[in-house]
Image (tube, grey):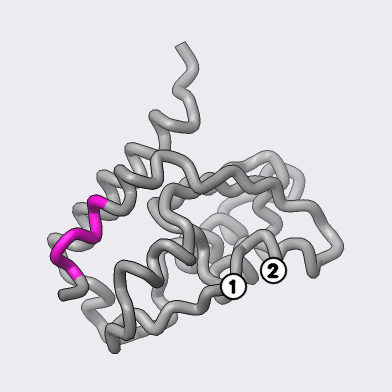
């Protein structure tokens, strides 16, 4: 049976949990968001026609920087759990996450190529991953 978006998104939650346990941006590169790194790796590994058929799963909505990277890489679809707006309510004004409350749909709508967006999906599960992290 083919995995659903929910199944694959929960895998992304597991990866995010593992990343949190291993340290958030351990080398100090504040641009090293997972989505940006994945977009970079994907456009090096796949042809443009393949990327247009790919879906990137993310525990949280891609920020403006990551949405731009996804767009420029040519990835055709994104599925995310936690919205950027809800993340902002969780992180507040925490120094390590000065959230840009700019929906990825707005970034993608500014481009000339379509990026399909599904999310927020399983948002309460995604939000639970942030409990106690930004205190």
Q: Residue at (62%, 50%) from the top-left corner?
A: 46
**Residue sitting nearer the eye, 58 or 102:** 102
Magenta stretch containing residue 12, yes or no?
A: no
Residue 51: tell me if it is visible.
no
Q: Is residue 132 magenta?
A: yes
Q: Which residue is mark 1?
A: 102
Q: Is residue 74 above or below residue 30?
A: above
Answer with left or right where residue 128 lies relative to residue 33: left
The number of discs equals: 2
In the figure, residue 9 lies in which quadrant? top left
Residue 73 on image: x %, y %: 66, 62
Which mark, residue 107?
Answer: 2
The residue at 32%/85% (across/down) is: 93
Quarter of the N terminus within the rendering:
top left
Q: Is residue 62 above or below residue 91?
A: above
- Magenta part of the chain: 128-133
Name the residue furthest top: 1
Regarding mark 2 in the picture, which secondary structure is present there?
helix
Q: CA distance from mark 2 to mark 1?
A: 8 Å
Image point 79% across, 52% down: which residue?
A: 114
Are the two marked residues, 2 and 1, in contact with CB atoms closer than 8 angstroms? yes
Circle 2 crowding by C-alpha within 10 Å: few under 14, some 14–19, many from 20: some
Q: Position of residue 49 (x, y in %)?
A: 76, 45
> Residue 7 lies in what quarter of the image?
top left
Q: Single out the residue that lies furthest toward the right.
A: 112
């Amino acid at each position: 049976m083919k995995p659903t978006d929910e199944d694959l998104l929960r895998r992304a939650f597991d990866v995010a949990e593992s990343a949190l346990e291993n340290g958030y941006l351990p080398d100090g590169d504040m641009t090293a968001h997972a989505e940006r790194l994945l977009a970079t790796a994907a456009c090096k590994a796949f042809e443009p026609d393949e990327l247009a058929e790919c879906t990137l799963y993310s525990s949280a909505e891609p920020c403006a920087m990551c949405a731009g990277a996804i767009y420029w890489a040519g990835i055709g679809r994104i599925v995310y759990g936690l919205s950027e707006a809800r993340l902002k309510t969780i992180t507040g004004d925490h120094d390590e996450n000065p959230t840009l409350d700019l929906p990825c749909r707005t970034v993608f709508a500014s481009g000339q190529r379509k990026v399909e967006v599904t999310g927020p999906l399983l948002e309460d599960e995604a939000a639970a991953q942030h409990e106690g992290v930004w205190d």
